[in-house]
Image (cartoon, rainbow, N blue to C red):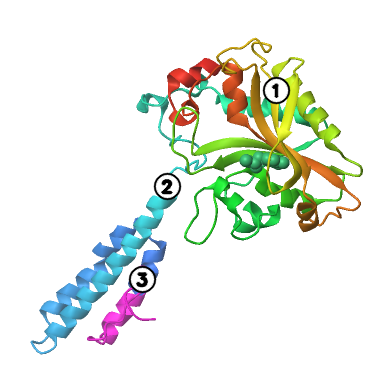
Amino acid sequence: MTGPRCHGIVKSKRTRMNPHIAHIATELKKKLQSLPEKRDILKAPELRELYAQLKVTSQDERPAFGQAINQLKQELETMVLGYESAAESAALTPIDITAPFDTNIKPADRPHLLPTELGSRHPLSIERQVVADIFTRMGYDVLDSRQIDDDYHMFGSLNFPEGHPARDDYDTFVTEEGLIAPAHTSTMQNRVLKAGEPPIRSVLIGRVFRNEDLDAKHEHTLNQIEGVYVDRNINVGHLLATLKTFLDAYYKADLKFRIQPAYFPFVEPGFEFAISCPFCNEKGCMTCKYEGWIELLGCGMIHPNVLREGGVDPVVYSGFAWGLGLDRLVMMKHSIEDIRNFQAGKLEFLRQFK
Ligand code: DAH
């Protein structure tokens, strides 16, 4: 090994150590190991002895002798420093890296941080749990969606051929390596289809990302609830009954719904699903913009190509899927006018949901 090392001894290329000094060096290094106070080695009598010998060394030998003693002293010093820094780091209190601040700092020394009992759960987290509970009772697995994905799950597996214009509706963020911040939770469809044999009943909830011009209705980061149901003999009736059951439970109402055809490459037929306004019962209010109806989500019967790509035989099985915005549901429930409130971190907003 060449070059200086922290604890090791560096042999000088210039000086060959005098055998007498070399012997003392070995002794001192041995002694250092057992010394409780490492720095005491620098005051060892053996070292002092060497300096005394230097004074009586002949003129010719003195420079080399002196250099060798200095070299030894330096080596010992480096070793002492090594011991000291090791001891210092061993003495540090462990840090809880999962905590939002250094928990070793006493509460009195961090007055700028709120006591945890003054915090509250984020409205989206609260409502995510409400949604998950309803679907769990309906027999669904509820899983998190992924927050970083690839072209195959975002498009290819969902029947968007390369260069298809429908890809433009999902403009999102892409890394230089080609990883995608998913623009919808439908990216999870292929994974749940591949994960097990039908019957498949899964709900995937998570963040999605869009390259949007931001305003009260548009955010770059939002949350979706994706549903996938696959079994034998599944039809549009099952899809509509499922969505109505969920929405009635969520809004605690007996809602009417209506559908109209819509195009999504991964479903055939595809629909837009609207509910009668849960707040005014079709009379017209601010939430439904006096229309009495609210367009809520996209859904449809899973396209045979998507089933096949997920390893499910479309001749034997059929299924439905939907994608619904969680933010939208919560905004309606609590009459929140601006979607940007969710991520603004404003305490006045967040404290209302305690
Ligand atoms: N992924 C679609 C979007 O974000 C919504 C959607 C439509 C999801 C139809 C579905 C579906 O599962 O069947 O615009």
State the residue position of label 2: 91
Residue, far bottom: 60
State the residue position of label 1: 275
Residue 3 forms part of the magenta stretch? yes
Query: Circles 3 and 1: CB distance less than 8 Å?
Result: no
SS type, badge 3: helix
State the residue position of label 3: 29
- As drawn, 42 above or below 106: below
Q: Look at the image and tell me in which quarter the N terminus lies.
A: bottom left
Q: Look at the image and tell me in which quarter the C terminus lies.
A: top right
SS type, badge 1: strand
First in sequence: mark 1 or mark 2?
Answer: 2
Determine crowd level at label 2: few under 14, some 14-19, many 20+ residues with C-alpha closer than 10 A. Answer: few
Q: Quadrant of ligand 1?
A: top right
Q: Nearer the viewer, residue 55 or 223?
A: 223
Assess mark 1: CB under 8 A from ligand 1?
no
